[in-house]
Image: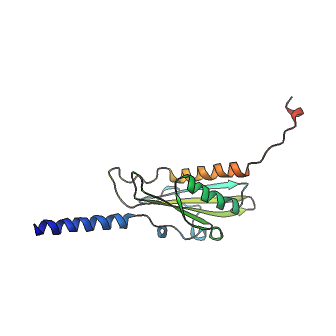
Amino acid sequence: MEFVMKNLMLVIVVGVSTVFTGCATINMLPPDASVVDFDSTEGKTGWSQYQQVETFHGYNNDQIYQAAKVGLGTAGFSLRSADKSKGVVIGEHGITAHDWNIITGVYFKELDINSVKVKIITEGSKDVGFSGDVTSDGWAGKVLKGMREYLNDTYQSILKINKSDIQ
């Protein structure tokens, strides 16, 4: 009986430590935009890492910073860290059917007065479930979609039409 209890305890300790060492943390992401390579490979770039880049024309850093926070929120992420001067907004998504947690960083840098380049880096937990590594779930796309919707709804210009021109 003692042998069974010791083995059971070992299995529990190993199982719990595996769960906690597999979780994604903020430290897995770059601390700010200055160390991010905005021109590197996109798609699946690591065990459970995904990256996507998009350039937003007609917007500035302030607008993109606000949009990043909204985009993470609409994708179901809780805000964990945001620093406009460092060009970074980080959010965490809790447990899903396939992951213990997901961390996503939105990094941005101004290209010129009216263009901002954005890179989304998503890290999932380092576990292998029954489905294998399926972290992606399009998290970067969901965040970018939320950003686009916010920018369009908030900063969309209203066109003035001369009715005589459409007759």
Instruction: Measuring from the top left, give residue 76's x and y in whole percent.
Output: 52, 54
Q: Is residue 147 left or right of residue 8?
A: right
Identify the residue shown where x is 43% and y is 64%.
24
Could you say which quadrant of the image residue 9 lies in? bottom left
- Relative height, residue 167 to residue 116 (above, below): above
> How many marks do you count on the picture?
0
- Relative height, residue 7 to residue 67 (above, below): below
Instruction: Measuring from the top left, give residue 103's x and y in whole percent.
Output: 48, 61
Could you say which quadrant of the image residue 7 lies in? bottom left
Question: Seen from this angle, which residue lies furthest right?
Answer: 164
**Colour logic:** rainbow
Instruction: Measuring from the top left, give residue 136's x and y in whole percent.
Output: 46, 53
Which quadrant holds the N terminus?
A: bottom left
Question: Seen from this angle, which residue lies furthest top?
Answer: 167
Identify the residue shown where x is 54% and y is 52%.
75
Q: Is residue 48 left or right of residue 153?
A: left
- Relative height, residue 128 to residue 86 (above, below): above
Identify the residue shown where x is 36% and y is 66%.
20
Which quadrant holds the C terminus?
A: top right
Identify the residue shown where x is 47% and y is 50%.
137
Instruction: Measuring from the top left, give residue 139's x and y in whole percent.
Output: 51, 53
